[in-house]
Image (tube, helix red, strand yellow):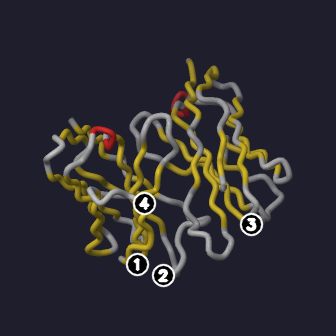
């Protein structure tokens, strides 16, 4: 079965500093997508960044970047120049693309990130 | 209204009540999803409608009944719920191009959720 593990239930960082959130996953598929979603205290979940497994280049979106290690099945999120608005729950998710797969997202338990002033 | 909206935002109901959750997406998407979010558990996919057809029922008890009258609206009808059904219920949508496949790499857009408490 496919699983997603986020080993850090809670983290904190000082404003303007850099923080890295960890995610590992388990799958036998070779083609898939990985995601980081953010759920601020207002509760609306939004996509932060997406990575296609067959792309070796790590995805970046402004201050957010990932370190995708396919062999190690690791997908960490780095937030640079942390801002107060980055305070949220961060979820790592996986979607396989093999034929017959329902393509539903497999979610981790989340990491609660607090950015301190 | 923009994005994905959900009503009500909060709902308290007794175990014998019947209520409905409503979701509306203003994004022109073809797929809509119901998720259950409980503390200490991963997000649980409940139902998926793609092009108005129900394509996923993730072993959800029959006390939850979805309805998708058109591609913009999704309902979750609730009856005789149990206290363990208390959770945040999230609706999401995504743009799909095929009736046979959904999800995968496509971004899902979420509503703010309905916080349900069953007494």
Mark 1 residue element: loop
Residue at (23% x, 54% y) in the render: B78
Q: Residue A42 location, x and y as percent?
A: 39, 37
**Left-right relation of B2 to A69:** left
Q: Quadrant of residue A99?
A: bottom right
User: In this view, which residue lies farthest toward the left?
Assistant: B17
Label count reads 4
Q: Residue B91 location, x and y as percent?
A: 37, 56
Residue at (26% x, 38% y) in the render: B117
Tag 1 residue: B51
Q: Residue B93 location, x and y as percent?
A: 43, 63
Question: Disc 4 versus disc 1: distance between alpha carbons?
Answer: 21 Å
Callout 4 and callout 1 share a chain: yes
Tag 4 residue: B59
Tag 2 residue: B99
Question: Disc 2 versus disc 4: distance between alpha carbons?
Answer: 21 Å
Q: Which image quarter holds the N terminus of chain A?
A: bottom right
Chain letter of the residue carrying label 4:
B
> CB atoms at circles 1 and 2 under 8 Å apart?
yes
Please name which of the two marks, 4 or 1, marks the residue nearer to the observer.
4
**Left-right relation of A52 to B40:** right
Q: Within 10 Å of the Cα at label 2, are there few (<14), some (14-19), or many (20+) other Cα atoms?
A: some
Q: Quadrant of residue A101?
A: bottom right
Chain letter of the residue carrying label 1:
B
């Amino acid at each position: 079965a496919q699983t997603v593990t986020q080993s850090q239930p809670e983290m904190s960082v000082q404003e303007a500093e850099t923080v890295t959130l960890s995610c590992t996953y388990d799958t036998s598929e070779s083609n898939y997508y990985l995601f980081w979603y953010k759920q601020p205290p207002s509760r609306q979940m939004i996509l932060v960044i997406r990575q296609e497994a067959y792309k070796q280049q790590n995805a970046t979106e402004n201050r957010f970047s990932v370190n995708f290690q396919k062999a190690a099945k690791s997908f960490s999120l780095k937030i640079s120049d942390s801002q107060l608005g980055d305070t949220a729950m961060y979820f790592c998710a996986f979607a396989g693309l093999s034929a017959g797969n329902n393509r539903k997202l497999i979610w981790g338990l989340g990491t609660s990130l607090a950015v301190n002033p | 209204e923009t994005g994905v909206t959900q009503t009500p935002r909060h709902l308290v109901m007794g175990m014998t009540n019947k209520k409905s959750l409503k979701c509306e997406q203003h994004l022109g998407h073809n797929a809509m999803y119901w998720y259950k979010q409980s503390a200490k558990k991963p997000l649980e996919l409940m139902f998926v409608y793609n092009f108005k057809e129900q394509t996923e029922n993730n072993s959800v008890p029959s006390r939850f009944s979805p309805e998708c009258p058109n591609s913009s609206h999704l309902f979750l009808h609730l009856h005789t719920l149990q206290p363990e059904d208390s959770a945040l219920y999230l609706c999401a949508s995504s743009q799909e191009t095929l009736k046979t496949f959904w999800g995968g790499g496509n971004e899902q857009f979420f509503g703010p959720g309905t916080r349900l408490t069953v007494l």
